[in-house]
Image: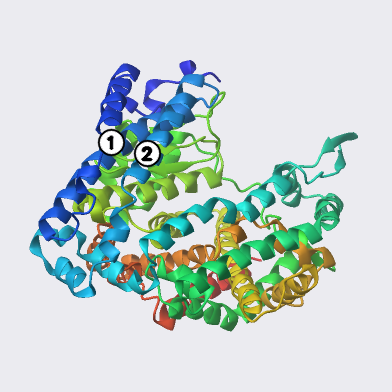
């Protein structure tokens, strides 16, 4: 389908950002002429001067982000359009210039005495930046001199080589073999592999698994060396900046304590019997004598999809999120009717789905809606992101409006959990109910257990290297294989090739990132339960979180909403929810 054939009500309205391309180009030219902050260099030693600098930088950034938003959306409408590719290149160049122009600020501020920074944090004129200064004080011991920081900044590109090598190997030079499908040879790809592992043909799943990992086996030594290079990069920065460990260095970036990481892994270990029980049920439902690792993606309930039109799906989402109150529901409708959402799959349009929220503008959502259950939940998920951005931008000053990645998946997952519980409560269809219970269990398995398995692998691999043990294909594979067996238990046949799954995970090149998915779903389950059991008080607490932006550390913000990740009880609640769902599923078997 061509974009011109889509009704206007199914398209987002970029006119809310700029009326036309000409207006964008005029605004870009004006912004490009204003990018000069040299007047502030060497002056950031008084509250008055610091405030003036922050306000000037913010005004420029807000306009630059508006330019970016328009270019980004127009580009994604059809990625083939040269004009909008050029817009994106121009705006990214503008951000590069901005970074260079303002690079003096952090070293200047960090060089100030701690007493001065503490005074800035308490100064009423700088109240919008109090948390920024508290964080700057905490990082002060790990910031080097201006000359040293300049050298470190220049290492960022070569230090990212391991990630670049992995991406090239994984996407361009993996040389995946062909597989026979319907009598024809087809090139195996990452996407096709995922489709085949979800398919009903067990022999084809086994064949695809073996062929897929045979390609990784051929380059496993290179992949191990590449991953070790990424870990050594982390150790280099850890040592230079004086952190106790790579893990603590990564957590400090978002003001999260190591206690949260430890709570997560401990809680998941305690819940191993539950996961092993789920694996036993899966094995029984699939009807085989064995259940291999490549059988874990097969739906246990077939032909129970929600096949709804977009209008029906959106109405269902609105009903499911009614416990969040009239204001939230009104905003959902405003998003649907007010040009926030681009609904239809069209030629050249970016695939997948996302939400983007930029300060001073309403959020935007990209969909490629199809009539599946997953797409219904995608609406709820992306609108969760959007309204998180909406409330944070509305209630916080620019400096505190952008929430950190640690909490980024919480609001979206709260929406999914609320929708799921609504469907389970209202459906009379036994098959659909069984399908939804399985949907939730697999959500917990893939987002909570699997991501924690990844997180534990990262922690142990870094600890090995920090202790002076070189990483190679043998010790990495032994570590991963042992974790896989521990997480999924004896009901699963742990095929030998699963030991090298670590070698194909792109997120491992963003060290200590994946645990945030697991803490996110844990927090979301706790918050959704409070909303459904406590009503309005819990909703108001949740709105405080949604409105919090980055006004304080993310763990404290989640605590306001009723999800205390420093308390094991929050993790135990998520596991209890998993257990209850498992028991409900067993009753229907």
Picture quadrant of residue 443: bottom right
177, 537: nearer the viewer = 177
Q: Residue at x 22, y 54 (%)?
A: 42
- Asked whether residue 295 appears in the rendered view, the answer is no
Residue under label 2, please give it.
97
Q: Residue at x 38, y 50 (%)?
A: 385
Residue 78's spot in the image, x, y percent?
A: 51, 25
Residue at the right extreme of this rendering = 183
Residue 12's spot in the image, x, y percent?
A: 37, 29
Q: Is residue 206 left or right of residue 418?
A: right
Q: Is residue 383 left or right of residue 534?
A: right
Q: Residue at x 48, y 64 (%)?
A: 516
Picture quadrant of residue 162: bottom right
Residue under label 1, please give it.
35
Q: Residue at x 30, y 24 (%)?
A: 29
The N terminus sits in image quarter: top right
Q: Is residue 115 above or below residue 16?
A: below
Do callouts 1 and 2 mark residues in contact (Cβ within 8 Å)?
A: yes
The C terminus sits in image quarter: bottom right
105, 90: nearer the viewer = 105
Query: How is the rendered protein coloured?
Result: rainbow
């Amino acid at each position: 389908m061509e974009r011109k054939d889509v009704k206007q009500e199914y398209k987002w309205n970029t006119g809310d950002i700029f009326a036309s391309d000409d207006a964008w180009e005029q605004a870009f030219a004006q912004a490009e002429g204003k990018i000069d902050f040299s007047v502030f260099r060497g002056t950031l030693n008084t509250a008055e001067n610091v405030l003036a600098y922050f306000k000037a930088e913010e005004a420029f950034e807000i306009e630059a982000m508006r330019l970016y938003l328009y270019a980004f959306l127009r580009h994604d409408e059809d990625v083939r359009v040269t004009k909008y590719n050029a817009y994106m290149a121009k705006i990214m160049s503008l951000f590069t210039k901005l970074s260079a122009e303002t690079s003096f600020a952090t070293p200047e501020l960090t060089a100030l005495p701690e007493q001065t920074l503490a005074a800035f944090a308490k100064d009423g004129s700088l109240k919008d930046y109090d948390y920024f200064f508290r964080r700057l004080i905490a990082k002060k011991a790990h910031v080097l001199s201006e000359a040293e920081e300049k050298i470190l900044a220049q290492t960022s590109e070569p230090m990212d080589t391991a990630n670049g090598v992995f991406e090239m190997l994984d996407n361009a030079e993996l040389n995946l073999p062909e597989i026979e499908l319907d009598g024809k040879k087809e090139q195996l790809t990452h996407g096709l592999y995922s489709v085949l592992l979800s398919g009903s043909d067990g022999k084809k799943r086994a064949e695809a698994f073996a062929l897929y990992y045979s390609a990784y086996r051929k380059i496993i030594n290179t992949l191990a060396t590449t991953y070790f290079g990424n870990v050594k990069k982390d150790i280099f920065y850890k040592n230079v900046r004086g952190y106790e460990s790579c893990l603590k260095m990564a957590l400090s970036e978002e003001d999260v304590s190591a206690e949260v990481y430890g709570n997560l892994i401990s809680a998941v270990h305690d819940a191993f019997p539950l996961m092993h029980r789920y694996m036993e049920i899966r094995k029984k439902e699939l009807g085989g004598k064995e259940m291999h690792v490549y059988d874990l993606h097969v739906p246990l309930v077939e032909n129970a999809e929600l096949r709804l039109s977009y209008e029906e799906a959106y109405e269902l989402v609105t009903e499911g999120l009614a416990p969040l109150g009239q204001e939230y529901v009104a905003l959902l409708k405003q998003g649907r009717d007010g040009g926030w959402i681009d609904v239809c799959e069209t030629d050249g349009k970016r695939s997948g789905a996302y939400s983007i929220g930029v300060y001073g503008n309403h959020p935007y959502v990209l969909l490629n809606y199809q009539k599946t259950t997953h797409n219904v939940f995608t609406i709820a998920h992306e609108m969760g992101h959007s309204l998180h951005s909406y409330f944070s931008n509305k209630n916080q000053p620019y400096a505190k409006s952008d929430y950190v990645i640690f909490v980024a998946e919480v609001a979206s997952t709260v929406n999914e959990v609320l929708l799921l519980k609504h469907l389970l409560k209202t459906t009379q269809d036994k098959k659909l109910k069984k399908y939804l219970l399985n949907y939730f269990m697999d959500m917990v398995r893939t987002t909570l257990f699997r991501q924690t398995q990844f997180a534990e692998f990262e922690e142990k691999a870094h600890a090995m290297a920090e202790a002076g043990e070189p990483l190679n294909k043998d010790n990495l594979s032994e570590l991963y294989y042992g974790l896989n067996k521990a997480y999924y238990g004896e009901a699963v046949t742990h095929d030998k090739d699963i030991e090298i799954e670590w070698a194909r995970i792109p997120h491992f090149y963003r060290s200590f990132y994946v645990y945030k998915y697991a803490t996110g779903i844990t927090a979301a389950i706790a918050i959704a339960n409070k909303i459904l059991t406590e009503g309005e008080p819990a909703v108001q607490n949740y709105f405080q979180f949604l409105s919090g932006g980055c006004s304080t550390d993310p763990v404290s913000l989640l605590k306001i909403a009723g999800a205390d990740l420093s308390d094991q009880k929050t993790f135990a609640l998520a596991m209890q929810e998993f257990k209850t769902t498992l028991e409900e599923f067993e009753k229907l078997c």
